[in-house]
Image: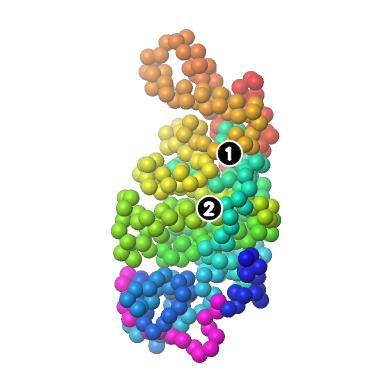
């Protein structure tokens, strides 16, 4: 099955261009949704819209209705004229992948945005992924060193795990993934910046792609002002590149910022189709997209490669019960929650230890490490639950032995959970410092 993605294979039959040139006509345009007559092409096909004024637009086939082909523009609808000719091109349902993407920054269509030369495609990969059996996904047994002390020590991650970083706006999600990207150990690092501000994209590329590790990194960036289907294609391109390198046996780190913006793009497409919004305006298809993307990460028993997924999840209005947050919490293998209260106290990264969880920590950490992590969690929970009483002076020392210990250790615990942006703490150092903190 995997051999079908390589050049010269059966995917050549997927080209829609052999034989007489086919084209259709734009019959209607409604908020970026086009209805085209006279052209029958598969879903996922990219089409070129040529106009008499010489302006060329691109669109993607997303469905059919009443004998007409439905397309969504990959750009702005300005200068689009009724009756314009529509030509199919490319490989439907396939995305370009390969070694030539390493060290480059591209958009959702795989075109370079870093000012470099055009990327020569080595192979193609299905945009929906290569489906394998559930038993092909081997279990997570190897710890993943992310270089961030509170994560390594208390919410230890594993190679092949999918974890979400959940917080409201402005609490430090982007800063934390910067720290993880600099400190993590992986063969290939793929950054998917979906729906973010263009200013953040420029700064991110400057920090990560121009460093010493840039040669083994790929950035797929689709800012917020791009069409929703192009944002969705950007996420699919990133995970397709990760799957391609996992198939080669590589350890891949996939950092997607953010999963919520992907859900927003899928919501726009679903509502444009007329699908009713159910969970706070999200149609069922929008939340289903998250399952499809997340399930493509993980370990491969066949190739020995892995995709460790780090996904940021924006909690709109700091609501931890937001549909996207709730869905991500259910399908991911763990979640790291950032607290606005902790950020306002000056603790960075503002990780809420009590609310954060790694579902694979018991499998990748030693018994002693797990016991120390539980002990630190208990101390943090005891202090936070009684913090108001302590600050008001309503607590009398000696009433609760664990709370007394938590109060005495609070400065040390806060220093342990904090870490500067440019600091890197390895897994062994994190465990050693945790042991020293608790005096075990």
* Residue that mark 1 sits on: 360
Residue at x-position 47% and y-position 34%:
355
Question: In this rendering, does residue 396 appear at all?
Answer: yes
| Nearest to the observer: residue 289 or residue 259 | 289
Q: How many marks?
A: 2
Residue 359: x, y in percent? Answer: 54, 38
Residue at x-position 44% and y-position 85%:
23
* Residue that mark 2 sits on: 295
Judged from the image, the secondary structure of the residue bearing numbered disc 2 is: loop
Residue at x-position 65% and y-position 26%:
368
Magenta segment: 14-31
Judged from the image, the secondary structure of the residue bearing numbered disc 1 is: loop
Residue 99: x, y in percent? Answer: 67, 65
For marks 1 and 2, the one nearer the N-term is 2
Q: Which mark is residue 384?
A: none
Would you place residue 38 above or below residue 331 in this image? below
């Amino acid at each position: 099955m995997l051999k079908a993605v390589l050049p010269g294979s059966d995917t050549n039959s997927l080209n829609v261009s052999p034989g007489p040139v086919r084209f259709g006509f734009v019959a209607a345009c409604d908020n970026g949704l086009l209805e085209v007559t006279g052209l029958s092409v598969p879903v996922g096909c990219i089409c070129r819209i040529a106009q008499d004024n010489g302006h060329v637009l691109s669109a993607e086939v997303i469905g059919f209705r009443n004998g007409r082909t439905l397309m969504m523009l990959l750009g702005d609808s300005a200068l689009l004229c009724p009756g314009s000719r529509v030509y199919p091109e490319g490989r439907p349902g396939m995305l370009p992948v390969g070694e030539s993407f390493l060290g480059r920054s591209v958009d959702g269509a795989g075109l370079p945005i870093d000012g470099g030369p055009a990327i020569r495609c080595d192979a193609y990969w299905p945009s929906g992924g290569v489906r394998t059996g559930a038993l092909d996904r081997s279990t997570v047994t190897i710890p993943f060193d992310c270089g961030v002390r509170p994560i390594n020590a208390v919410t230890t991650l594993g190679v092949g795990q999918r974890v979400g970083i959940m917080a409201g706006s402005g609490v430090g999600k982007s800063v934390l993934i910067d720290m993880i990207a600099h400190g993590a150990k992986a063969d290939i690092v793929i950054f998917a910046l979906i729906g973010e501000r263009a200013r953040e994209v420029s700064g991110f590329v400057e920090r990560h792609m121009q460093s010493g590790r840039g040669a083994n990194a790929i950035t797929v960036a689709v800012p917020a002002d791009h069409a929703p289907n192009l944002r969705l294609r950007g996420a699919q391109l990133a995970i397709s590149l990760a799957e391609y390198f996992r198939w080669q046996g590589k350890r891949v780190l996939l950092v997607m910022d953010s999963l919520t913006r992907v859900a927003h793009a899928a919501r726009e497409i679903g509502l444009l189709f007329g699908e009713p919004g159910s969970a706070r305006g999200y149609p069922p298809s929008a939340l289903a997209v998250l399952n499809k993307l997340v399930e493509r990460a993980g370990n491969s028993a066949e190739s020995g490669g892995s995709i460790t997924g780090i996904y940021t999840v924006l909690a709109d209005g700091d609501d931890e019960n937001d549909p996207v947050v709730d869905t991500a919490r259910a399908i991911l293998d763990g979640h790291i929650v950032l607290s606005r209260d902790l950020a306002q106290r000056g603790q960075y990264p503002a990780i809420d230890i009590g609310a954060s969880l790694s579902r694979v920590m018991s499998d990748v950490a030693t018994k002693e490490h797990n016991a120390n992590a539980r002990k630190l969690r208990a101390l943090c929970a005891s202090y936070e639950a009684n913090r108001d009483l302590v600050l008001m002076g309503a607590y009398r020392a000696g009433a609760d032995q664990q709370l007394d210990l938590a109060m005495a250790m609070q400065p040390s615990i806060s220093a342990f959970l904090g870490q500067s942006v440019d600091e890197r703490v390895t897994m062994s150092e994190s465990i050693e410092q945790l042991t020293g903190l608790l005096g075990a």
